[in-house]
Amino acid sequence: MIREKVLLVFINFENFKNNTTKKQRYHKTINENVEELKNLTISAGADVEEILCHKQDKPNPKYFISTGKLEEIKNIVDNKEIELVIFDNEITPTQQRNLQLKLDTKVLDRTALILDIFAQRAHSREGKLQVELAQLNYLLPRLIGKGIELSRLGGGIGTRGPGETKLEVDRRKIRKRISLLEKKIYQISVQRDTQRKKREEKNIFQIALVGYTNSGKSTLLNATTDSDAYVEDRLFSTLDSTTRKLKIYPNSEVLISDTVGFIEKLPHQLIASFKSTLEEVKRSDLLLLVVDISNTDFENNIYSVKEVLKEIGVWQKPVVLVFNKIDKLSSGELNSLKIKYKNSVFISALKRRGLPELYLRIKKIIERHYLNIIVKIPYNENKIMSFIYSNCQVLRRRDLEDSAILNLNVNSKYCSILSRYIYRGRESREAYIG
Ligand SMILES: Nc1nc2c(ncn2[C@@H]2O[C@H](COP(=O)(O)OP(=O)(O)OP(=O)(O)O)[C@@H](O)[C@H]2O)c(=O)[nH]1
Ligand SMILES: [Mg+2]
């Protein structure tokens, strides 16, 4: 495969700062931004030839970048035979078109780059449909008027996914395709919902692995379930969700799911299209937020993940911060982080270190999730009796003349259903033990 030669452009509308200041606390420093866009470009299969950082007061309406700097870019493009210019900033469809005409080369922004990586990684039918939907939603406003003639610019980054011919069809056809894709994705999600409902009815405890891309979620899934999910040192290796039984509970039903990783400024088109994949996260009882502790920017990464979790409406769930890759730290560094993050778990998914502590934490949360109650059920209440046997763990049962007294472990969400059967007699413990 031919690797495209890329120029990366960063424009800062404030002062450049290499250190994180209070104001920038939750934004990457320019160096970290450069590093991340570089990694994204490499993950997309291209070579970074040149990087250009520029400070500007405000965006130029026509070209986004100032005209002086544009000339400099034009020279670099011509001299180094650059085939693709990627802006870290979001540029408007009109600016993108003007830049392409002026530079006579392909121009993309960070969103388009991420969409391209997703298009390359999508293998399942659902994944492909979701990425195509996100790409078409991104392309639609870019097809105004004359449209961008991507086909003229050949293949490579930004042209994968919906084929060339699709890009040339008019907006009406694209809209039609979008609604067809939405329908297909909906149909798949309905099938998946049925499976999920079965799990929910069975009172299965579900854990979801969430975190920044490349933090080690799939490695942790493999370590905790003896499976072999795809792992690689690149961004967005996983797109589809995988669900497995947790090893520490081989005979009971505790499931753990791995899913797509997040990134700062994750394109909203992607979040919208991956709704059904992210449903796994929405339905879970516990989130393990996996953090690559060896990444100097891990605190910002946690913040970005929280932002996405808020956006999909799951930030209220119990969350455990799982700091991964501790094998890459010195014991001094590790100890000071352990003091700072007292309630977190520190592991190395790769070297299988710290897993017993993680299991202990999960067990405690599961125990809290299930309440131990004693109920008295009259024999003629068949419905509630069968509900109990299919949804609760029956620890002990004592049969009386007209009813049974049961000691149950119940998912807290079912307590309201059972509340009127709670056996409150002063002798309840003895009655049950009796
Ligand atoms: N040193 C070290 N490397 C690790 C550890 N856990 C994972 N890795 C490496 O980190 C890289 C990414 O791991 P993955 O498990 O694919 O990460 P992920 O979070 O699933 O990534 P995406 O699916 O791309 O979002 C791989 O090269 C892993 O071998 C660890 O504990 N220590
Ligand atoms: Mg993964």
Image (cartoon, helix red, strand yellow):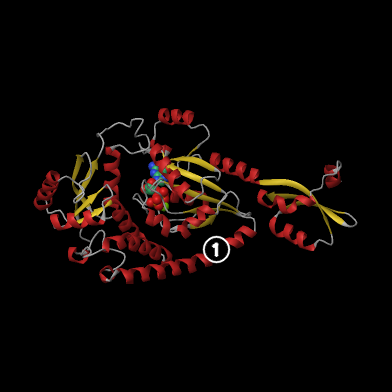
Q: Residue furthest right?
A: 401
Quick one: 253 or 318, which is closer to the camera? Answer: 318
Quick one: 34 or 124, which is closer to the camera? Answer: 34
Any part of residue 351 in sight: no
Identify which residue is drawn at 61% across, 62% down. 198
Identify which residue is drawn at 43% across, 45% down. 307
Neighbour class for label 1 at 10 Å: few (<14), some, many (≥20)? some
x and y percentages locating residue 179 in the rendered image: 41, 68
Q: Is residue 245 left or right of residue 258?
A: right
Vertical side of 30 occupied by 108: above or below: below
Q: Is mark 1 within 8 Å of ligand 2?
A: no
Quick one: 91 or 346, which is closer to the camera? Answer: 91
Quick one: 83 or 97, which is closer to the camera? Answer: 97
Any part of residue 274 in sight: yes
| Mark count | 1
Amino acid type at mark 1: Asp
Q: Which residue is mark 1?
A: 193
x and y percentages locating residue 155 in the rendered image: 22, 63
Vertical side of 14 occupied by 388: above or below: below
Q: Is residue 404 left or right of residue 268?
A: right
Vertical side of 123 occupied by 71: above or below: above
Identify which residue is drawn at 27% across, 71% down. 169
x and y percentages locating residue 418 in the rendered image: 74, 52
Q: Is residue 263 left or right of residue 203?
A: left
SS type, badge 1: helix
x and y percentages locating residue 333 in the rendered image: 40, 29
